[in-house]
Amino acid sequence: FDRRTEAARPAPFRRTGRRTERHALRSPQKLCGHAMTSLAEWHAAVNNGEWERITVRVGLQTFPLRTIQQVELERWSSPPFVWDRNWLVLGHDGSPHAFIGRDGSINVLTLASSALVKEAQRERDVSRLIELGAETRERAIALLEVYGSRQAAANALCAAADTSIPSEVRKWVEQLRSGGERQKEAAARALWIFTVTNSNTVWIRRAGGIPPLVALARGGTDGQKEQAAGALAELAAGSLNDDNKVAIARAGGIAALVPLVRDGAQMQKEHAAGALRNLAYRNADNQVA
């Protein structure tokens, strides 16, 4: 980017309130996600399931990725690298550029850099977390670093303030997030047992237990994957758990369970298949995904 070119251009106008003022041009890297990220960063973000970094822009509106779009990006990024070329369009460097809608609309993809995500967490989102219940800026930043995103930290704050959630459920969910490997497996097993009644499945979702269970199903040990898949199957079972089905899909549960059905051990396959069956029952979006 040539600074002389920037200086030679007239500064655009920005209307603020009753008066109009000039503002300096921003660096193009801050305006374009593709200029900030390489092909390797796209592969890393998709393979690590960092879906909060990827957004879809349709016209002037921006949306998070849908589950079916996440699955398509995983197909693009994983061997044998087969994806629907009529739907997912790649840029000149081979990175995902856009999805083409059925109506011909162009859904432009943008990947925020890790540095920008952390900056947003530390600056813009801290004030919101403080409003939700983190009394100090230091505590809000600490929560963001522990949970990884403002939404996850906010969910933890709300769960902590919800006195209707049994203490046992809180304990096991926290152990899922921060315990050792054996503790995480034991916590997943305990939550699976808690899902015997539908009321317990509601408590587990409200306590924030679904994202860490999905994380274990995706990248845990063999024992953790088996217990997490069983718990997710029960959380999605029955017609009274429609909210759980949506929450599991949004957390990337479908993409985490499919590899277990294909390549997992015998019990992992059975539990993952049961979870996918329950997720698809009376849920059109999950059936497509």
Image (tube, grey):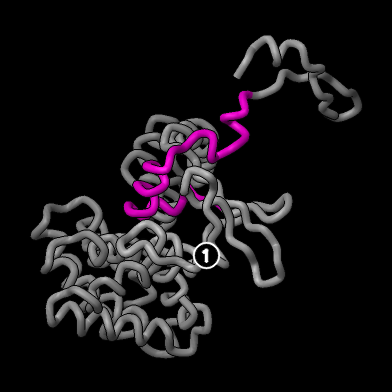
Q: From the viewer's perspective, is residue 43 above or below residue 210?
A: above
Residue found at x 66% / y 72%:
102
Question: Which residue is labeled 1 in the image?
Answer: 85
Q: Quick one: label 1, few (<14), some, or many (20+) residues within 10 Å?
A: few
Q: Can the viewer see residue 57 in this picture?
A: yes
Q: Is residue 239 magenta?
A: no
The outermost residue toward the front is 92
Residue 128 in the image, given as x and y percentages of width and height? 54, 41
Of the pair 203 and 272, the residue shown nearer to us: 272
Which quadrant would residue 191 be assigned to in this image? bottom left
Residue 242 in the image, given as x and y percentages of width and height? 46, 81
Q: Which residues are magenta?
A: 27-55
Main SS of the magenta part reads helix
Q: Can the viewer see residue 199 in this picture?
A: no
Quadrant location of the N terminus?
top right
Residue 186 in the image, given as x and y percentages of width and height? 12, 66
